[in-house]
Amino acid sequence: MENTVEEMNAKISVKKPAFMLASKIILILAAIALYVMQGMIAIPLIGVMNETDTGDLDIPSVGIVLVITLALGLIAFIVAIIGAVRNEAPASLFTPIIKAVLIPFFCINLFLWVMGFAAMLNPFLFLGIPFLIVIGVCLTYIYMFMTGAPDIIYTTIFCIKNKKRPTILMIAGIILCFIFVLDVVGSALLHISFKKTIQED
């Protein structure tokens, strides 16, 4: 029994992050793209509200930036898989920082979607509101999830590869990563758990 406890408490040696760090850098680029996209939507909307000419909403350009953002999130996820398979350190400190930096984005994002719903409160567009709600919730959830996905996949592969039971902090962190707002706490819990579990070479 003592050996089992010692094995559970022993730190696991991992390589210095290369792919995992690249994954976080890609997520930072995705975060920048999200703010660019938001600006492309917000500036014309503010112009309409203030009755000033700030240009028209360029929907095709917004769509392109959205695709780029989602592609960056997917690439970050794939790169994280490679890093986890290589048994690298997770570079998990960057995740709560990225999530914290995106808090203003999500606040403005909520405001923009509410304005979109308000604009559809007329008899001709009323039926489109449920559709708009589904799109808004799904896209917002994807934005939130993609920032934590590399750490989630890392935790899974790390435990399987090293034949280690996930700690309570890891389990709690992964669960919270699926919940709005609490995902920031979840990413911090994962980072703390990794610091206790991993010995970087």
Image: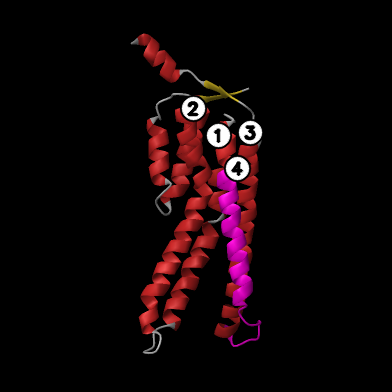
**Dot 3: what SS?**
loop
Nearer the camera: disc 3 or disc 1: 1
Which quadrant of the rendered structure holds the N terminus? top left
* Residues packed near mark 1 inside 10 Å, few (<14), some (14 to 19) or many (20 plus): many
Q: CA distance from mark 4 to mark 3?
A: 11 Å
Q: Which residue is mark 1?
A: 84
Q: Which mark is residue 177?
A: none
Range covered by the magenta-colored residues: 50-78
Q: Which residue is mark 3?
A: 17
Residue type beneath disc 2: Lys
2 or 4: tag closer to the N-terminus: 4
What residue occupies the far top of the structure in this picture? 2
Q: Which residue is mark 4?
A: 79
Q: Residue, x 51% and y 51% (percent of image)?
A: 146
Q: Which mark is residue 161?
A: 2
Q: CA distance from mark 1 to mark 4?
A: 9 Å
Q: Is there CB contact under 8 Å for labels 2 and 4?
A: no
In percent of width and height, residue 165 lies at 40, 26
Query: Foreground: 48 or 161?
Result: 161
3 or 2: tag closer to the N-terminus: 3
**Dot 4: what SS?**
helix
4 or 3: tag closer to the N-terminus: 3
Q: Is there CB contact under 8 Å for labels 1 and 2?
A: yes
Q: Residue, x 54% and y 60% (percent of image)?
A: 104
Q: Residue, x 50% and y 46% (percent of image)?
A: 149
Q: Is there CB contact under 8 Å for labels 1 and 4?
A: no
